[in-house]
Image (cartoon, helix red, strand yellow):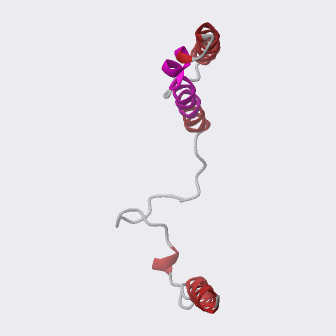
Amino acid sequence: MNTVMTSLTTYLSISMILAILAFWMPSLNPDATKLSPYECGFDPLGSARLPFSMRFFLVAILFILFDLEIALLLPLPWGNHISGPLTSFMWASLVLILLTFGLVYEWAQGGLEWAE
């Protein structure tokens, strides 16, 4: 028990010391080079705080949605081994039909057009 407490105390103190040093060390001598945004060695061309396009977020959300579709449909081949394989096939078909309708809706609304 003594060894565990000694190890835990040592790990905790080293972690706290490193966290405090990491928090206060960069602010000792800030200059213009450290405070400027990094752009691969080139001088910054504009503001680094420009907002992202909403289309970027829409494409990202659509990617996550269809990635989750694959994750939900991945166990489908193992669904044939349960007592009612027709039930698992119907649920998978329902998910696919619902997501296909969503994709058609996004396509019709112009959400998949990257450039105008």
| Residue 69 spot, x, y in % from top left | 56, 25
Location of the N terminus by quadrant is: bottom right
Identify the residue shown where x is 56% and y is 91%: 28
* Position of 47 relative to 83 (above/below): below
Name the image quarter holding residue 38: bottom left
Identify the residue shown where x is 41% and y is 62%: 39
Given residues 9 and 46, the one toward you in this image is 9
Residue range corresponding to the magenta coloring: 62-80
* Position of 73 relative to 31 (above/below): above
* Position of 98 relative to 12 (above/below): above
Name the image quarter holding residue 49: bottom right
Given residues 54 and 25, the one toward you in this image is 25
| Count of residue discs | 0
Given residues 90 and 108, the one toward you in this image is 90
* Position of 13 relative to 70 (above/below): below
| Residue 88 spot, x, y in % from top left | 61, 14
Residue 45: say if magenta: no
Taken as a whole, is the magenta stretch helix, strand or loop?
Answer: helix
Given residues 17 and 42, the one toward you in this image is 17
| Residue 80 spot, x, y in % from top left | 53, 14
Residue 74: say if magenta: yes
Name the image quarter holding residue 21: bottom right
